[in-house]
Structures are given as C-alpha cells and as structure tokens.
Image (tube, rainbow, N blue to C red):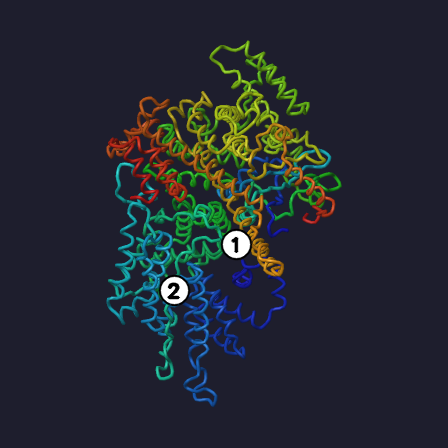
Amino acid sequence: MLSNSTTLYIGNLSFFTTEEQIYELFSKCANAADGGGIKRIIMGLDRNTRTPCGFCFVEYYTHTEALASMRYVSGTKLDERIIRCDLDLGYKEGRQFGRGKSGGQVRDEHRQDYDPGRGGWGAQAQRLEVERRRAVEERYADAQDGPGAVAGGGEDWKEIETSEGKLKRGRSPEDEGDNARMGQRTRTDEVAEVDRM
Amino acid sequence: MSYNRHYRGGRRHYRDDEDERRRDVVESPQERMKNTIIRLGEVDPLQEISAVETSIRELAPPDICNLSESFHIGVTEQPYKIPFYAALLRLLHNNPSQGGDSIGADEISLGKQILEEFWKGFQAYVDKLMWRETRLCIHFFAHLTSAQLISTESFAALLQSFTAVLDEFGVSHGRAKRAALCAAEGLMIAGAVLTLATPTFSREIISSIQMYTETTTSGKWIVQPIVRLHSSAVTVENADELLDTALVVLKALESSDFVGPYPRPYSEYPPLDTSTFSAFVLPSVLVPPEVIELDGLSTEAEESEIKREEWPEYFLRLFGDDVTPDPNTPAGYAVRTDLLAIIDIFEVNRKEAARLLLEYPKWVVSGTFKPKPGAPPLEVEPLVTYDWQLESTLLETMLGASLVLPQSSQAQIYYDSLITEVCKLSPSTVGPAVGKSIRKLYSSLTDGLDVEIARRFSEWFAIHMSNFNFQWVWKEWIPDLELAVQHPKRAFMRTAAEYEIRLSYYDRVVKSLPEAMHAPEAHVLPKQAPGPDFLYDDSSKPHHDAAQSILNLFRGRAKAEDVITHLDTLRNTLESEISETENVNSLVRIISTQSLLHIGSRSFSHLLNAIERYLPLLRTLASGGVTASAGAGNPEAKADILSAAASFWKYNPQMVAIVFDKLMQYQIVDPTDVVSWTFLHVSEVDEFEADLKAPLNLSAFEWNLLKGALDKAIGRVNIARRRLALLRKEDDENRARAKANGGNMDVDGEAKSDEPVPEDPALAVAVKAFSSLTREQKAALSRTLEGFVSCLAPSISSSHPNPKAREILTENSWHNRANWGKDEWIAWETWGWYRHFCRAYSPYLRNYAATFTAVSFARFEGQSDPASDLLQKIWDISIGQE
C-alpha cells in the first residue's frame, strides 16, 4: 500500500550521483527520534553494464519520512539535476536493474536530447567527469542478483539472545520469516518498473 | 491572470492532484459554491465581495452547512483574506428585499445563519485544541465584532476565557503562548470597539499577558539566539520574542486608540438596521485542559508519549526597520503573523506557499510594500508609506522561523526548500535578498550567534548553493582566514564547504572556491577528497599481512565462523610481534573492523552488505574476547570498533556518522557506547587534525554523533512504546471478549468466568523490551550530561583539560574575544552545545532530573566556581527548576 509506504523511487538522477550524496540529501527528512532513519538505498543499475542508470530506491523506517521527502525534496536539485520522488510499493528482488532493451531505464531509450549527467558523455566529457566516470564504472562491478544480493539495512531493536547457538546463525528467525514472505510477494505481486517511466 | 490557473480551489493540499482533477469535471453546485467562496478576491478583493454575495443568494435553497464550511476553509487556510470574508458575511446579514410577503422582521438573515453554524465549527476547534484554527477564527470574530455583527461583550468574554488559561496552575509554555496569542491578536483587531464598550478591557488583557511573560525570563535566556555566557540578562538585539512583541504591539495600539493596520472593507458599508438586527452573542467557551496522551490506554506514566517542550520563541531580525517591518509595530506584527501562517499552513505544498508569499502584498493596505519595479503607478494615494521590501521580508520571516531554538516548528529542510522555491519564482529580486541574509548571518557569527543556529545556517547554505550551481562569492571572506582557526566564521566556512561536498563532489566544490582557500593552512577544505583510509593498505605498514589474510577470507566470502577461527590463529601470531604495551585483542579488533569496512567501502550499500554478511563476526568482536560468546558486549571492545571505523573514515566525516548509525542499528554497539566514545576517543582519531581538536573539542561533527546516538535511543523507546500500547489494547480487547464469552456460557457454572485470561507472551516481551530500552535511553542521556560536565568543569586529573573552559566565562574575556585563540573558541563552542543539549532534550532530562542532578552535580556541592555554577544554571533552567 502506498498509503503507508516507506520506500521512494527517485528518478532523474545523474549517472554519477553516489549513494552517499543521496544519503546526505534524504537524511534531512529522517527523524531518528521518532524511530526513523534511512534504512537502505538501492542504486538502479544497467542490467548489462552494472553501472548506475539514473534511478534509485530510498527506503526509510517510517512512512512519515517518505512523505516528508515527497514534500520537501522532490523537485529540488541533487548533483545539479532536479530529481523526482515517488512513493513506491517497496523494493523487490531484481528491481535494482533497468528494464530497457539496452539494459538501462526505459525512459532513457526515448530521449532525444544530449544529457551530460546521464550517459551523454564520451567525446564531450569534461575532464572533471572522467574521474567520476571511472569510479562509477568500477563501483558496482560486483553487483549481484538473486535472493539476498541486496542488504536489508538493519531491523528494529530486538533483545539479543545470549546463547551461542542462536547467534551463529547470524540472522534471527524473524528475519528469515521476513525474507520468505518477501519472496512470495515478489512472485505474486509483480510491479513493473516500466509503469513509472 | 496566472493566479486562477494555478490555484484550483483553495484546499488543494487536502487531496491529491488526481482526485482533484476528477472533481473539477463533475462539480456539483455546492462544490462550485464552495470554490467561489474559497477563491474570493483573487483578482480584486473589494469588487468581488458583492459578486460572491449575489451568487450565494442565488443558490436556493441555501445550504448553510456548506456555506459555513466554505467560510471555515477560507478563514483557517487563507488568513490574509479574513477581513474580506468578514465583509462578505456582513453583506449577507442584509435583508435582501424590504417588505416582501414572506420576509418578516423575525426572519433570520443568511449571514446570521452562517455565523451560527460557523460558531459550532469554532467550538470543535477549541475542544480539539486546534490552536491555529482557533486563533484564526478569533481574527475573523474580531473583524465581525468591529463590523457590529458580534456583540462586543460576548467577544470580550471569549478573549478572557483565553487569558484565563494563563492563570492555570503549572500551565505549559506552549499552551500559555497559544492562548495568549489568541487573546492578544483578537484585541489587536477589535480593540477599538472593545475599549469603546469597556475602556479598561485592554488593560486587563495586557496585564494578564504581561504577568505571564514575566515568568519566562530564565527560559528566554536559554533560547536566545545570541549567546552571552557571562550574563543572565536577556538582552537580545536583532531578535524578537514572539509574546514580547505581541505585548509591545498591544501597548502601542492602546496608546493610539487601536487604529490598527488591518484592511477593514466592511467599514464602508452602511450601518445595519438596528430595528431588525441584533448582534450575535457568542456562547461562552471553556478552553479544555491539555490531553495527556492516552493512546493505548496505558496506565503507567512512563509509557506516555513525551511531548516536546516549548520555550519562548525568538525570531532573528536580519534587516533594518526601513527595509523590513519591525514586528514590534502593529503593522509589522500583522505582516509577520500572516506570513508565518502561510508558511505553516502550506507546508504540504511548498510551491503554493512560495507563490502565496510573493503575492502577499495584494492583501495588505497599499503602500505597505514597495511596488514591483515597472509596476504601473497607483491610481490612488497609498494609505501608508512604509515601502518595505517584500523579498527581504520573506527571507527574514522564513529564516527567522527556521532558526527558532531549540527546534523549528517544521522540519528544517522544509524552510530550505521553500526558500529555493521563492528564489525560483523570482530569481532576480529574491537572489539579492538571499545574499544579504547570508552576509548578515555570517557577520553575526562573531557576536555570539548560537551554535545550533550556526549549524542550521551552514546546512541551509549548502542546500541552497546545491540548488543554485554553487555560486557564492567566497572571496569576500578571504580576509577572515586571519581569524583563529576555531573562530565561528572559520568553522562556518569549513562546515559549509564540507556540506557542499557531501551534496556534490570534492572537485566541483574546490572549483567554486578562490585559490586562497585551497591551501591546507586555510582549513576551509578537507585535505583531500572524502575517501577511506585503510590503515593496512600499504605493504610497508605493520600488520599489512595480517589484514590481507582477513581480507582474503572476506573476498572469498568465507563464513563468519571461519573468519572467527582465523582470528584466533592470527591472535597468537600477532602476540609475538607486538610490544608489551599493546593489547593484542584490541589490535585484532581494529584490523578486523578496518578490513570489513574496506570490503564495504565502495558505497553505503556495500557497507550494509559487508556488515550483514559478517554480523556474527562483529558481535564476537564487540563481545570483548575475540571468541567469547557474545552478550551485551564489552565497552572497550565496542570503543575499539568505533575507533577503527572513525579512523577508517577520517577523511569522510559523513561516513563516520553513517557507520556509527548502522552499527547501532545492527546492535553491534549501543547509543551509550557512541556517546562515551565521542567524549573519550574522538580526539585520538586523526593525529593530523590534532591541532584542531585537542583539547577536547565539541564541534558540529561531534554534536552530530551525540545527537545520532541520543535520537536512536529515544527513537527505540518510541517504537517500543507504540508496540506496547498496541499489544495492551489488543490484550484488553481479548480479555473483554473472553469475559463476554464467559458470560454467555455461564450456564455450567461461575467458576469458569473467574479464570484469568493468560497474558499474551508477546506482551511480556514488549514490556521487557520497553524497560531495557528506557534504561538504555537514560544511560545515553546520563553519559552525555556527564561528558559535558567533565569537559566544561574539568578536574585537574582529567585527560584533556581545556584551560579556557572557565576563563572565557567573564564579561571581560567576552569583550576581548577579538584576541581569542583556538582554545577559547573551542571552549565557547562546547558550552554552546551543552546549552543546546539541555534545552533540546529537556523533556527527557526532566524525567530523570533528580537522579542526574545527584550523579552529575553533587560533586560541586559547596563549591563556587564559575564553570560549575554555569553548568548548574543551564541544567536547572532546562529541567524547569529555576
């Protein structure tokens, strides 16, 4: 349900924008004292090249924070581009990859204009951007897919069990339960990213 | 005119756009009526009033509820139109046809019917303590009283029921402030008719507000935006306290027969026929007591939600009285009240807010603001000749609201984005006002601008520059590089540049700064682009091989258990390599943590992946002995992990905060560990920065770490509280149901229904979690207080005593601040953060006032020392004991 969603889809990012830049801007809407904060950021990647392709998901702990981002951050600039935020039903496995034919975002395949922050580089690249480009190309080369490829970001506080056996499993039974449920939803509730392009 | 096109029906922010579009298509006559009323005056208020009156009369039969609701929306969401709504309601009090068959003398006019209905809505606002709506309705009633539609006696009684709140025993400042404003603003608008009826009335209201404000002096001291550590006097130039200004304005109006600055379109209308008309008598109201949060029917006092403490509200002035209105004058107060209301009401739609702010001059009497350049000359003589600058006024009001201490009423980023929108709508006129505001704030850094205000200023600066191509004339600040390295101006340049880099990237920001600021000695820019600093990267570094062995396991995705086993072997090897003074366990923790962060250094997501994959390893490390079974952890081990993280990211302060946050989130460390670490170890992280840091220095960076930890602790208690309340409610319902069922099956015997319903095990867990987390919250707060106390009143034995912590507290020292060096400014800033800690967390600190006082302040008993006296004074004020 969007009415209690804690995830945002962020569009029109520069291909160079890093998760830390995104974190910096979106943390202004975080409200830790209310039990909130940024849970995780999932960078949208080109399916083939594993490089950022201009979108991401920002997941908070609370819906109020996601709403605040819609009000105060959507339509402002990040890395000199006006970014767009939409409430999102939540990240599902595989959604970090672009769905366009070329591997990137569908919308970029319909664009006619030259866009320096989004793949419009090459011969025209400014010197500054060459360095950023290199970093970007390498950063996500190790991006995995499949279950568990994307970290959860940490759940709410739980009493720590002190017996050794339980700890060694690494994740608590509740976490696994969550994952199983998530998996099920992925199958039954496909949300095409294409819809929002 | 673009106004209508954008506007689309006044309460746009209630619905989403799509919903609205649908409604526009099938608009019922009632909805059309509502929109007509809401849009009143968008082209020419004065002319439209009678046109709207006619269309209201034409829609038969009148739907009084709908009409009243439309007035409610108009009044509470567009307060700048209130005088015009009053005029409209005045016209609706006329009897349309004289002497017709059906209209008798006892016929109730449409206007009066609406007013009666409107009153019910007002009553509901009061009952629900919706203060803003209540106050704006009082504005409306005040105009209606001036227009003779409401009896003056009943309106006077209404205002008195609000001043009565000020006499309540133990009234909170928030409640008193809101009630006082209701009474004060009602009197400002209707003062002329009220004092005509009862000449002593204004005196009464004024003195009751004054008696209240006299009790708030110590509170003012702790939130005044300009810090004076040496003096208890509340002397603030360039800032005004909200209630104080209201009082000054009332007195000024009183001495000028309440000739106020408000438009009064109804004053032109012929008087009502007194033979058929009688003024509406407002029923009496009682302002209900503040509801103590009862959600979830929790019975324990500790489980109730903690409300934010309210303090006197200071608004900074940035411009002279000839440029922007002085809120201590009736006209200035009215302008600021309207602007603040727009900012607050339209928080949900900042673009709309920006547009309304720029269009504001059309709602005030002509001559209030300077006409736009190129605007046609006025046809009539302006009524006043203030000629204020709109853009500067807007900037001053928006920034003033965003810099209120201890926190602004809306999120900081809202004001930042609102300023951006206002700039985007009119760059050429707003731009210069932004520049002047920045310069004014910057120059007040020398005069003791509060540290939290300075922090918000640098955040806004960076956000603003990020939205406007990082164009700032930094070079005008080059002369300030001569100041002491920790001087607030230099600290500002440093923080502003750092925040810009976080939003952009190093090379981009470097490019926007003049050469003189590039040099490392300038201490404006970080020495290098933010990045990791892996201690063992270089093969010539000690323990390089050990780190490599761990890294190889991580890279090969070895299981956490295998890494733990490897660390045991490694420990034995290392033991033979190191000197006796080094602690091998500590070394293993540092190497392992650094290596793990190295694996996760590519991005925030990489960090999360690394932590999640090796949670068992981190827990083992945190537990102290490398392989000991994990429990709540060992404080030294956890300090080692934090130190390893802080030094790994020493060139990227943002990442330090992020890593700390996630280490708390994954319960590797607790908030108290972060607090302790910040006070004890932060200065050890970077030997190169040591000249900036030692003796113990609390700057915005350290404060941010403390705040992150405290808020995490508080947030967890809030989550646990909500969960507990929910479970209690469910449990109660289950019991009630069981009881009801038991009653039905009563036939067999009574014994059954007496059986206690077993308690939900989840409830027991929640109760336990809540109490553990409350304990942790208390520990984090206590540790912070203790940290401040030992660093500001250092004993001779403490590790990094700042010799200046006491010296700077004298008036002479403050006046000599031009000669202050690094240590003096460090001490000054740390005092500033202590003051902010106390006022920002006061609602929580109050809960533990007795314990904390005993723990942290008992040692000063019988001593008289300027530092301990000031620590105690700030503490006493913040817990409400002075």
* Callout 1 secondary element: loop
Residue B168 appears in view: yes
Which class describes the residues within 10 Å of circle 2: few (<14), some (14-19), or many (20+)? many
Rounded to the nearest whole Å, what is the CA distance between mark 1 and mark 2?
A: 24 Å
- Specify whether B647 is left or right of B742: left
Q: Which of A155 and A39 is in front in this view?
A: A155
- Tell me how many marks there are: 2
Q: Is residue B303 above or below residue B677?
A: below
Please state the chain letter of the residue tagged with numbered disc 2 in the rendered image: B
- Specify whether B619 is left or right of A110: left
Between circles 1 and 2, the one closer to the viewer is 2
Among all residues in the image, which is located at the extreme bottom? B101
Residue B281 sits in quarter: bottom left
**Residue at which label 1 appears:** B349
Q: Which of B351 and B391 is in front in this view?
A: B351
Quadrant including the C terminus of chain B: top left
Q: Which of marks 1 and 2 is nearer the N terminus?
A: 2
Which class describes the residues within 10 Å of circle 1: few (<14), some (14-19), or many (20+)? some
Residue B55 at x, y percent in the picture: 51, 75
- The reply to whether label 1 and label 2 mark residues of one chain is yes
